[in-house]
Image (cartoon, rainbow, N blue to C red):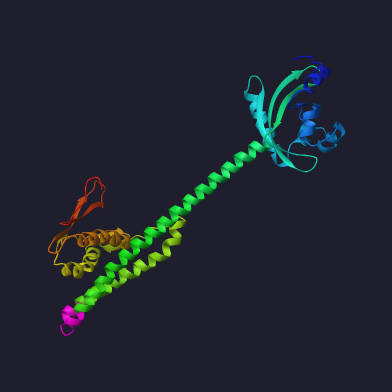
Amino acid sequence: MGRFNLEDIEEFARNMPGGFFIYKGDGTGELLFVNDVLLDMFGCDNIEQYKELTGYTFKGMVHPDDMEMVETSISQQVDVNEKRLDFVEYRIVRRDGEVRWVDDYGRMVHTDDYGDVFFVFVRDITEKYKMARELEDKRNAELELERERQINEVKTSFFFNLSHDIRTPMNAIMGYTELSRKHIDEKEMLADYLEKVYDSSKHLLSLIDDLLEMSKLQSNELEIKYEVCYLGEQLKIITDMFKAQADQKNIEVIYDFDDIEDIVYVDAKRLRRVLGNLIDNAVKFTPDGGQVTISVEKKNTSKSGYSRYTFLVKDSGVGMSDEF
């Protein structure tokens, strides 16, 4: 810019509809000029009050908590902008203590008289900022409501499924208990029935333990707990639970996994739960005299020591449409 007449700029800027000020870019931030609109923005009646409030420096204008951010932003923008322009938003503190938000459009120019200086246009955006904050708060409130709705849906689904799951081992316990009473004098049959009651009781206990996982579900801390077990043994525990239920409806249950004797590493409780849900649905929706087939297919993988298992539960019930 070379030389510039500060008096001419003052005369021109004094009648601007918005705030305007000039300050040195030498690190001191010393103000060279402020117009009346800016004085009013800071709640000052005259320049003396403004100097007392701000020390007549740019740093004195900016809220202390925002100053580091403002200086960094301006410096980065001016360094990469050919026209040495910058735009920042920050808070100011009025003479009466009220905190307001402003946006600041500045340009650095070099002068012979003052070195680098910033010409800055500023306006009060407090109401605009409040509206934006209110919209953000509203969005956050809506998101929180949606989150609570989803949590409630998860809870409802969880308890519905849990009650559904609990009925399965309970039916098995009741069924085998009744058979035990009928065959109380037949030791081998009684021992077999009591073993099935015991297995179903353990499964029921594991489902009750799931109630404690509700808090973990809400905080995304649900863990898969792997253990070494015999896959065939787990399948027997699952299928035995549904034998009494199937017998009551005269449903033929075909097991196609007699040769599965593998030792596997799995969350046995959740494996039983998933397969149990499938078998329970198959028995429930198969009419009297129908058929349910439970099969397991094993395929070795290219990775040594690993296998892939496909579990299939097939029934002769009503089925479902492709769309469903």
Q: Horizontally, is 217 left or right of 264 in the view? A: right
Q: Horizontally, is 119 left or right of 128 in the view? A: right
Magenta segment includes 324: no
| Quadrant where the image shows the N terminus | top right
Residue at x-position 41% and y-position 55% = 153
311, above or below 55, in the image: below
Task: Work out whether residue 247 or residue 317 is closer to the camera in this orientation and state it.
Answer: 317
210, above or below 307, in the image: below
Measuring from the top left, give residue 49's x and y in whole percent. Answer: 85, 36
Residue at x-position 28% and y-position 69% = 169
Measuring from the top left, give residue 282's x and y in whole percent. Answer: 21, 59
Tell me the chief SS of the magenta region. Answer: helix
Q: How many marks?
A: 0
Answer with the quarter of the image where residue 108 lies: top right
Measuring from the top left, give residue 156's x and y in whole percent. Answer: 39, 59
Residue at x-position 69% and y-position 30% = 104
233, above or below 131, in the image: below
Task: Work out whether residue 91 or residue 226 is closer to the camera in this orientation and state it.
Answer: 91
The magenta stretch is: 180-191
Q: Is residue 28 visible?
A: no
